[in-house]
Amino acid sequence: MTAQSRGASTTVALLGDTMLGRRVGERLDAEPDRLPVAEEVIEQLGEADLVVANLECAISERGEPFAMPGKPFFFRAPPLAAEVLARIGVDCVTLANNHALDFGPDALVDTLAHLDKAGIAATGAGEDERSARQPAVLHRGDFDLTVVAVGDHPAEYAAGPDRPGIAYAPLRAGIPDWLAEAVAGAGGPVLASPHWGPNMVHEPLAYVRAAGAALAGAGATVVAGHSAHVLQGVAGRVLYDLGDFLDDYTTDPVERNDLGLAFFLTFEGDVPIRLEAVPLRLEYCFTRLARGGESAVVAERFRQRCAAFGTEVLAREGRLVIEWSPGA
């Protein structure tokens, strides 16, 4: 903790998989003034100093679906999507996932340009391996947050020395040296954002738990993963999966990927002391706050999945709360 930042409070909101392509994109084109997120959610996000989301699509009008046998889904949003993210309040997106290169290198380059024009930082993908691995550093007052993003699938999307792509790491084999060095070398609070593991699995696989522990051991202040599309538990300062935030996906009646959480990290100085979560309901191409029974289902599932790791979740003023001691 620096002398300047000691005692200051900062809130960072974390949003899971955010997809503005396909039917969401069609609605944006048809009704460009209608946001796909309810004002009540935007107001909650407005209380945060920084908002970080995992962007699970390209933003472009160019490109063709990536030639990958067996890949079923390809997501591309119209250029307006970058402005929409900014209007929602997003400050930074992570791109190290299995949809960043869905429409090829030209569409990825366009994505980076559209985000930059909208004033949104991006990390986890780039025009080459070096830029894809480059962390984003976010500033609010005296608070600096380094965001490091990495994806463990697909290997075909990996950036090369002179090839656009994602910051790829085969996490089943452990965290590579470059990733450990990126986390350890930040010199302040670090948010590690891995896209790991399979879809629709509500318990993190053993290798995901091991990689989370390794990232924390390397110096990540908070680890916030995604990919499963459903909420998983929290162990220490490792959030195994943030779930979904916005999409047009089919709802699994058992796993209920249409129920999620928006997470809020509170820092005192450079130290995270609290995690709060607000229940969400993902309707078709539109996200709002969860209500009544919806909220109760989200809360109970999150409590159960956290309890599996010995993490207690409290209810406080409509939010789910996990308190962290400075040494947690």
Image: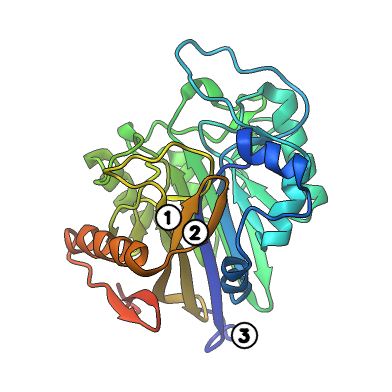
Q: Looking at the rendering, which quadrant does residue 317 occupy?
A: bottom left
- Earlier sequence position, callout 1 versus callout 3: 3
**Residue 119 x %, y %:** 78, 56
Q: Mark 2 highlights which residue?
A: 191
Q: Which mark is residue 224?
A: 1
Distance Cα–Cα, label 1 vs label 2: 7 Å
Colour logic: rainbow
Residue type beneath disc 3: Gln
In the image, taking residue 280 as reference, residue 13 lies left or right, namely right
Mark 2 burial class by Cα count in 10 Å: few <14, some 14-19, many 20+: many
Q: Residue drawn at (49%, 59%), measured in percent from left and top?
A: 191
Distance Cα–Cα, label 1 vs label 3: 26 Å
Q: Is residue 215 above or below residue 3?
A: above
Q: Looking at the rendering, which quadrant does residue 86 occupy?
A: bottom right
Q: Secondary structure at mark 1?
A: strand
Q: Residue drawn at (33%, 47%), measured in percent from left and top?
A: 256
Q: Quadrant of the C terminus?
A: bottom left
Q: Mark 3 highlights which residue?
A: 4
Q: Are marks 2 and 3 in contact (CB under 8 Å)?
A: no
Front in this rendered view, residue 125 or 117: 117
Q: Are marks 1 and 2 in contact (CB under 8 Å)?
A: yes
**Residue 159 x %, y %:** 60, 27
Residue type beneath disc 1: Ala
Visible residue check, residue 325: no
**Residue 325 x %, y %:** 31, 79
Q: Residue drawn at (77%, 24%), measured in percent from left and top?
A: 62
In the image, taking residue 64 as reference, residue 124 lies left or right, namely left
